[in-house]
Image (tube, rainbow, N blue to C red):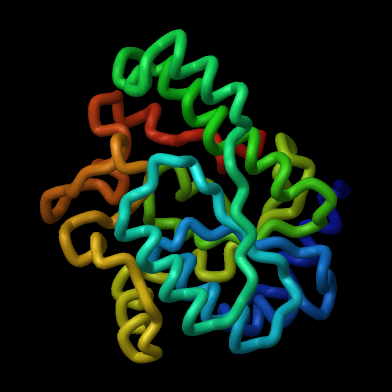
């Protein structure tokens, strides 16, 4: 991907409201855009915008097999409200069976290497299948979510996955997200009201204390600098 193309898109979406960014993606890429949702609050905002704008972007989620019951609840509520098709991508059965047979169901607690192996099998490999053939990947990333994401940009080239990534609510604050959800009656995961700002797989996520880092509840047993699963590594 030529860097000039990324700069061109960055310039054209600069200053646009999030829904206008979605409309821009629709105009420029249509069905060549794909949106990944984990049913977190940021993703629910974007699902609302996609439905409201009539975007042709395909929507998918990664069904890791270890999600919270509350995540399935909001998944169903989202389908009921927006009538959108959300494709589920599951991990490769053979790979999961091999890992769990050889290392047990909780090997990810034992080392960073084991945790990354589990993330790769349950999330990264299915992601590669989900975005294959698309030109643009829409995400709900916000800059303030973690220090690792402050160096990202609203529009960037993902060299690892060979795809343009656009984050329409990149500059939104958590307060803006919360206000939007309530004003527009957007369904959201009830765990967010119980101290879970970031929600992933059930064994790897816990509530955080007020003032803690946004991702403090993810892989809490690991060093802070390692707290990414690899979905959004761009280089």
Residue 190 percent location from the top left of the image: 25, 67
Q: Quadrant of the C terminus?
A: top right
Residue at image position (17%, 48%) is 208
Residue furthest left in the image: 209
Residue 14 percent location from the top left of the image: 65, 74
Q: Is residue 232 above or below residue 36?
A: above
The picture quadrant where one finds residue 22 is bottom right
Residue at image position (84%, 50%) is 133
Q: Is residue 229 above or below residue 24?
A: above
Residue 218 percent location from the top left of the image: 31, 39
**150 or 77: nearer the eye?**
77
**66 or 232: nearer the eye?**
66
What count of labels does the image hold? 0
Q: State left or right for residue 192 relative to residue 187.
A: left
Q: Is residue 18 visible?
A: yes
Residue at image position (50%, 21%) is 117
Residue at image position (81%, 55%) is 134
**1 or 67: nearer the eye?**
67
Q: Is residue 33 above or below residue 145?
A: below
Q: Is residue 155 visible?
A: no
Q: State left or right for residue 45 relative to residue 198.
A: right
Residue 4 percent location from the top left of the image: 85, 55
């Amino acid at each position: 991907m030529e860097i000039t193309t990324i700069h061109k898109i960055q310039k054209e979406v600069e200053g646009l409201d999030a829904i206008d960014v979605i409309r821009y993606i629709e105009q420029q890429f249509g069905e060549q855009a794909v949106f990944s949702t984990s049913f977190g609050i940021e993703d629910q905002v974007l699902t609302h915008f996609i439905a409201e704008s009539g975007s042709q972007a395909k929507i998918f989620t990664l069904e890791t097999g270890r999600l919270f019951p509350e995540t399935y609840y909001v998944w169903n509520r989202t389908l009921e409200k927006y009538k959108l098709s959300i494709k589920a991508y599951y991990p490769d059965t053979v790979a999961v069976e091999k890992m769990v047979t050889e290392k047990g169901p909780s090997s990810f607690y034992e080392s960073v290497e084991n945790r990354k192996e589990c993330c790769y099998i349950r999330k990264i490999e299915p992601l590669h299948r989900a975005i294959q053939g698309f030109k643009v990947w829409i995400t709900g990333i916000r800059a303030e979510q973690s220090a690792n994401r402050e160096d990202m940009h609203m529009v960037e080239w993902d060299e690892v996955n060979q795809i343009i990534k656009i984050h329409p609510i990149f500059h939104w604050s958590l307060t803006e997200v919360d206000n939007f959800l309530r004003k527009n009656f957007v369904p959201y995961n009830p765990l967010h009201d119980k101290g879970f700002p970031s929600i992933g797989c059930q064994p790897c996520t816990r509530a955080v204390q007020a003032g803690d880092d946004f991702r403090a509840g993810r892989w809490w047993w690991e060093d802070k600098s390692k707290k990414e699963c690899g979905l959004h590594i761009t280089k």
